[in-house]
Image (cartoon, coloured by chain):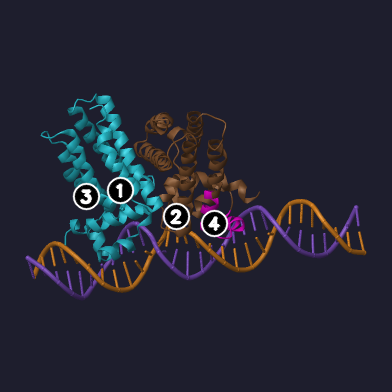
Chain colours: A cyan, B brown, C orange, D purple
Amino acid sequence: MSRETHLPALFQLFREQGYDGVSLANIAKATGLGKASLYHHFPGGKDEMVLATLGYAGDWLEQNVLQPLRQDDGEVQELLQGMCDRLSQLYDEGRQPCILGTMTFGPVRDDLHEAVKQGLVEFIEAIALALVKAGVDEALAKERGEDALMAIQGSLLIARAMDDPKPFQRVLKRLPGQLCEGI
Amino acid sequence: MSRETHLPALFQLFREQGYDGVSLANIAKATGLGKASLYHHFPGGKDEMVLATLGYAGDWLEQNVLQPLRQDDGEVQELLQGMCDRLSQLYDEGRQPCILGTMTFGPVRDDLHEAVKQGLVEFIEAIALALVKAGVDEALAKERGEDALMAIQGSLLIARAMDDPKPFQRVLKRLPGQLCEGI
DNA sequence: TGTTTTGTACCGATCGTTCGGTCTCAGCCT
DNA sequence: AGGCTGAGACCGAACGATCGGTACAAAACA
């Protein structure tokens, strides 16, 4: 069992409960490993676990959401629709939180904060790039990328607080059209 | 010194660091009280402290944001602009988080969760009411109220993650017009 | 065999909480 | 006036539990 084996379990824990909310005892139970085994796979301790988890999530996002978005051979609106479909899958139609959002409210640790920030920036830039390719002005494209992430994170937060995934679904449905407004 | 005296300090702590992130030692230092004294003012312990803090924040919101929004004698757009001005003050132009957002990512405790949910619902309904009074269809008004809170919370989250309050300021600037679209 | 992986027992620190008690001060009796 | 009393605000010290982390040897695998 390599360390990658257990990253999905860590991902589920951290996205739901955040850095402070997850204890090593929780992780041990979720993975079925003892503490010593956890420290064998993650010598850096909890910090390394959460950083590896962010890396795992970032890889999934990059491969399943951002890479397809960078394709050259497609109508922008269709690319964005594909992105929304993948996001709906990632967040289980609004029933699961985003680990980047969860970690934003965690303790102030520079490396963690930087990892979250970078994940968001890459996401925003991938959207902006798609819009620029479709002829949108560069500054406006970046604004719309930010708008998209604000809408996603905001809707996930509301969905979680209200125990109702519909706000997220509504936001996701109108997102492609909203981003392409004015072509 | 009554317990209300210390609520602003608790508010600042909890909005920034959340339930798990704030320890009684932190609170003791911030208030200048000993731990035992905290239990004199809040016999229910940490739970009562955070609940009282949410009540304090809710009262501020009700008095300074929602009540003015319910005024009858004003153009809707102006009422919404006033709301945004107050919100800008509450969140220090995007440099301070919303305690409702922060608490959304805290541990799953039913009473806390319910208090956060209720705060959001009241906020949404106050906005929706203002729109209904201006002639907007009831269902659409509720959707736009939800949209407003998603935009606010999403922009605050992004602002915090990126160490940049501008996304929040941008969202707040366009919010009144956005809510009144199509009169 | 040697290496990787694991369970157990343990560490110091900190968690939220409680105990026992001090200090101050207004109200009341004499 | 002087002394007593009770309530409220406050605090130091300690509680048991849990935190993240470690030492080490048995077990599993090569």
Tag 4 and tag 1, C-beta contact below 8 Å = no
Location of mark 3 (residue): A56
Where residue B7 sits in the image (x, y, percent)?
A: 57, 47
| Region of the chain picked out in magenta, as a range | B34-54
Q: For the residues tagged 4 and 1, is the chain the same?
A: no
How far, Cα to Cα, is label 4 from label 1?
A: 29 Å
Q: Describe the element under mark 3 as helix, strand or loop.
A: helix
Tag 1 and tag 3, C-beta contact below 8 Å = no
Q: Nearer the viewer, mark 3 or mark 2?
A: 2
Q: Which mark is residue B113?
A: 2
Location of mark 1 (residue): A98
Location of mark 4 (residue): B48
**For this view, does B124 lie left or right of residue B71?**
left
How far, Cα to Cα, is label 2 from label 4?
A: 14 Å
Q: Residue at x 41, y 34 (%)?
A: B179
Mark 4 or mark 2, which is nearer the start of the sequence? 4
Residue B47 versus residue B127 in the image, above or below: below
Q: Using a 10 Å C-alpha cutoff, classify the residue at mark 4 as few (fewer than 14 neighbours), some (14 to 19) or many (20 or more).
A: some
Q: Residue at x 54, y 59 (%)?
A: B45
Q: Nearer the viewer, mark 2 or mark 4?
A: 2
